[in-house]
Image (cartoon, rainbow, N blue to C red):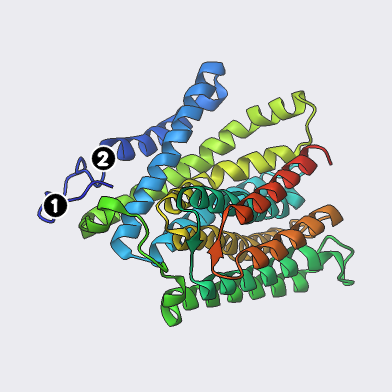
Amino acid sequence: MPAAPIAAPDLPDHPMLPLWSLALPALGLIAIGLSLAKIGGAGIAVAVAILIGCVLAAVHQAEVVAHKVGEPFGTLVLAVSVTVIEVSLIVSLMLTGGDDAPTLARDTVFAAIMIILNGIVGICLLVGAVRHHEQVFVLKGVSASLCVLAAMAVLSLVLPNYTLARAGPYFSPAQLMFTATISLILYATFVLVQTVRHRDYFLPAADGDLGDEAHAAPPTTRQAWTAFGVLLVALVSVVLLAKDLAPTLERGVLGAGLPLATVGVAIAALVLAPESLAAVKAARRNRLQTSLNLALGSALATIGLTIPTVAIVSLVLGLDIALGIDSKAIVLLGLSLLVAVLSLGNGRTTVLQGVVHLLIFATYLFTTVVP
């Protein structure tokens, strides 16, 4: 990131906030208002291009905010921002009804966990190790994240299959509220530990190869707030453009003879794209701790915020919500958590761990397409 003079004027075209990073999210809102994704091939192509631009803009603005507030708050900003908007998308789709509404939250959460735990983490470990041979991180922070993630995932996605108050994969209303409360308490406790009581567990173990960024003056307060606002606009644009493109994607998937679950995976990947790109960029700079903070923090926020929100919506509106995943998904979830504990269990990573995670992710994608 270009070094910013301390006394530079706080203008929108300042190098810290280039014009493209401000313009693209606005173009995203315009594309949504004009429904470009619904007016034919040319409109779809433009919408896809703007979507990619919004992802890049979101990553840039998140880096500006992170530079201002420091770690681990910076990575928390992007993780929570994306998840809040993802929850809004899920709730809006639940309210529209449809045959897939009861399983929408479950499928989205599980897809996000697999993408994050194996896809994003695997790419970060592989990219970082290829460039830097071996990378280090603070083991205490990653262990804490995996501990909470395992508890959340099993209680929310596996337990519903084995309770007796209501036949699985459903919770009874009392069980649903209890699980939602547990998820929220776990996530709130994790955030407290990450940002206050044990903040040092989540700080980078080393400075990494930051180049000029290490010497760049932080953005001004006005620039940071501007970047945060534009970040939210960019994330809204990413989610709503992905929603507009979903019918086209669904038609293409069905036309190719693929399972409809593939659509959920693709949409989850689009929504998580800003975090993914930011995490990979951090790994390339030898900042694996930042990458893992982003990845694991996003997985925790996905469960900790999504489950309580959809539980409340379903109970208030009388909607059914199926949370229990099938036996194939349980095997993949258990394997992913076990491998994550083993691969991230000594504070150092090489290409081997990255390859293992990516191959598990490939297995998840393959068994989704060929169940």
Image x and y of residue 18, in percent: 26, 40
Which residue is situated farthest in the left direction here? 7
Question: Is residue 171 at least partly visible in the picture?
Answer: no
SS label for mark 1? loop
Residue at label 1?
Answer: 5
**Residue placed at 54% from the left, 57% from the top?**
295
Residue 229 drawn above or below residue 304: above
Nearer to me, 75 or 255: 75
Indicate left or right for 96 with 17 as reference.
Answer: right
Q: Amino acid at mark 1?
A: Pro
Residue at label 2?
Answer: 18
Nearer to me, 331 or 257: 331
> What quarter of the picture does the C terminus occupy?
top right
**Label 2 vs label 1: CA separation?**
15 Å
Residue 21 drawn above or below residue 214: above
Image x and y of residue 325, in percent: 80, 57
Indicate left or right for 232 with 120 as reference.
Answer: left
